[in-house]
């Protein structure tokens, strides 16, 4: 008995030490993986051209962050690129959320092997990247190559799987009795979806909105092939001007552009972080 008590006393301090070490290690990993790159971007954006020629973590001798912001706004064509990004992102996000929520409602309520196969096919887009050559050739056949409509259609097709993955799991947690009560009162399928189901999908749709906005806002690969040279978005504009005379070897301006381009998403993440976490845990996990 005394030996057992001695063993317990020896294990308690080690258990408490491990509980303290784990969060410290996690915080250090976050600081190294996220804090160091963020610090590099900020301090480089605040330097002049000579100091930023070789980017480092050292503080600038004189902060010129706002002067660099002004230069980017004045000569970097950010406003047209910002409007172009909004023109593509807003309809894409709205359309993919609406179609994805409708599809998820059906997939979450029906139970059969055929529906299970359709669900697996619907979420396969998460792991199967779209073929760029096929997309461009198809858009040319449809007459949508180089247009905002074509780019919106591409994004909706690419990220529909993400919405289905998040929303279907959450739909299965909604009591069926709510829909049955609405049908008893004479509501049709459309009214049931927009009056009952859609308002309950708020947290999950908020999560999907943030993720899809992040993907579309920072995309340069597909936008380059579909609308490159015909419509400016922020990533495309940065890619183009980074090779021009203004930004050539001007790392302080490039990083200043990156900060301004990322600022709307950072603010959105800070405001909606609780909804993002609740949406992930309630939808994808279940």
Image: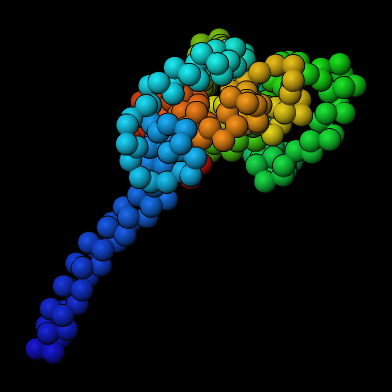
Q: Residue at x 51, y 13 (%)?
A: 74
Measured along the vertical axis of the image, is residue 151 above or below residue 4? above
Q: Residue furthest top?
A: 186
Measured along the vertical axis of the image, is residue 74 above or below residue 236? above
Q: Residue furthest right?
A: 141
Q: Residue at x 72, y 42 (%)?
A: 129
Q: Is residue 206 visible?
A: no
Q: Is residue 224 shown left or right of residue 181? A: right
Q: Quadrant of residue 213?
A: top right
Q: Nearer the viewer, residue 256 or 129?
A: 256
| Rendering coords of residue 189 (x, y %) | 61, 16
Q: Nearer the viewer, residue 121 or 226?
A: 226
Q: Residue at x 43, y 38 (%)?
A: 51
| Rendering coords of residue 130 (x, y %) | 75, 38
- Which colour style is shown? rainbow
| Rendering coords of residue 4 (x, y %) | 15, 85
| Rendering coords of residue 280 (x, y %) | 46, 39
Q: Nearer the viewer, residue 6 or 255?
A: 255
Measured along the vertical axis of the image, is residue 244 above or below residue 126? above
Q: Residue at x 17, y 84 (%)?
A: 7
């Amino acid at each position: 008995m005394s030996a057992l008590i001695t063993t317990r006393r020896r294990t308690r301090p080690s258990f408490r030490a491990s509980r303290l070490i784990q969060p410290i290690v996690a915080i250090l990993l976050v600081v190294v993986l996220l804090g160091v790159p963020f610090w590099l971007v900020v301090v480089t954006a605040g330097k002049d051209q000579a100091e930023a020629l070789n980017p480092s973590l050292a503080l600038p001798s004189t902060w010129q962050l706002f002067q660099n912001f002004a230069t980017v706004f004045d000569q970097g064509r950010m406003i047209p690129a910002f409007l172009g990004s909004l023109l593509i992102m807003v309809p894409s996000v709205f359309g993919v959320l609406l179609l994805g929520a409708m599809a998820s409602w059906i997939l979450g309520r029906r139970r059969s092997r055929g529906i299970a196969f359709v669900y697996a096919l619907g979420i396969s887009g998460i792991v199967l990247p779209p073929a760029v050559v096929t997309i461009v050739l198809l858009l040319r056949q449809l007459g949508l190559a180089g247009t905002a409509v074509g780019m919106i259609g591409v994004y909706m097709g690419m990220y529909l799987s993400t919405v289905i993955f998040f929303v279907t799991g959450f739909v299965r947690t909604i009591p069926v009795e709510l829909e049955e009560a609405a049908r008893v009162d004479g509501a049709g399928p459309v009214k049931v979806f927009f009056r009952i189901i859609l308002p309950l999908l708020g947290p999950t749709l908020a999560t999907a909105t943030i993720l899809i906005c992040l993907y579309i806002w920072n995309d340069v690969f597909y936008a380059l092939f579909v609308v490159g040279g015909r419509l400016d978005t922020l990533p495309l504009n940065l890619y183009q001007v980074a090779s021009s005379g203004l930004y050539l070897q001007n790392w302080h301006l490039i990083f200043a552009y990156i900060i301004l381009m990322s600022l709307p998403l950072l603010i959105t993440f800070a405001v909606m972080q609780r909804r993002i976490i609740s949406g992930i845990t309630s939808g994808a996990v279940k």
